[in-house]
Amino acid sequence: MAPAQSAEFTRATTDVKKFTKDPSQDDLLQFYAYFKQGTQSPPFADAPQPGMFDLKGKAKYNAWSKVANEGTSATEAQKKYVQLFESLKGPCAYKA
C-alpha cells in the first residue's frame, strides 16, 4: 500500500512543472529518487532493473537505489523532495 502523501509534497510535485529553467540533471535525478521513494510505487525491492542499454533508466534506478539503501523512509523522502523544490525556486525561476 502506498504511503499517505503530505499536502506540501503533493503541491511540490505539481509546482515543479512551473520552473521556467530546467534543473540540472543531478537535481532531476534527486527529484526522481525522492518521488519514487516517497510514493513507494512500486516498492524499491519490487522494481525491475533497467536493461543493459537503458542508460537513462540505469541513472534513475541508481539514484533511487542510493536513497532506498540509505534507509530513507517515504515520509523523509517526501520532506526532502519539498526541500529540494524550495531550494531550486530561485535558480530555476519558479513562476507561480
Image: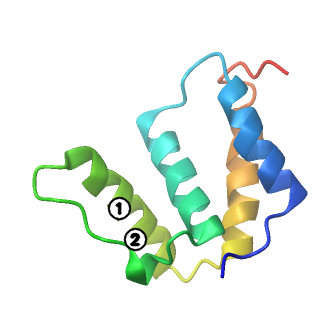
Query: Compared to 17, does 68 lie above or below?
Result: below
Asked whether, in this view, residue 91 is left or right of residue 12, the answer is: left
Which residue lies under the disc numbered 1?
61
Image quadrant in which you'd find residue 50: bottom left
Q: Depth check: 64 or 43 in front? A: 43
- Screen quadrant of the C terminus: top right
**Residue 59 x %, y %:** 31, 52
Residue type at mark 1?
Tyr
Q: Residue at x 77, y 44 (%)?
A: 12
Badge 2: residue crowd in 10 Å (few <14, some 14–19, many ≥20): some
Asked whether, in this view, residue 96 is left or right of residue 31, the answer is: right
> Of the numbered discs in the image, which one, if any, rests on residue 15?
none
- Screen quadrant of the N terminus: bottom right
Q: What is the CA distance from the residue labelled 1 to the residue labelled 2?
A: 6 Å
Contact between marks 1 and 2 (CB within 8 A): the answer is yes
Q: Residue at x 46, y 48 (%)?
A: 29
Asked whether, in this view, residue 56 is left or right of residue 64, the answer is: left
Image quadrant in which you'd find residue 16: top right
Q: Residue at x 50, y 70 (%)?
A: 67
**Residue 41 x %, y %:** 55, 69
Residue type at mark 2?
Ser
**Residue 47 x %, y %:** 38, 73
Q: Depth check: 48 or 93 in front? A: 48
Residue that extends furthest to the front in the rendered view of this protein: 1
Secondary structure type for disc 1 = helix
Query: Compared to 80, does 73 lie above or below?
Result: below
Which residue lies under the disc numbered 2?
65
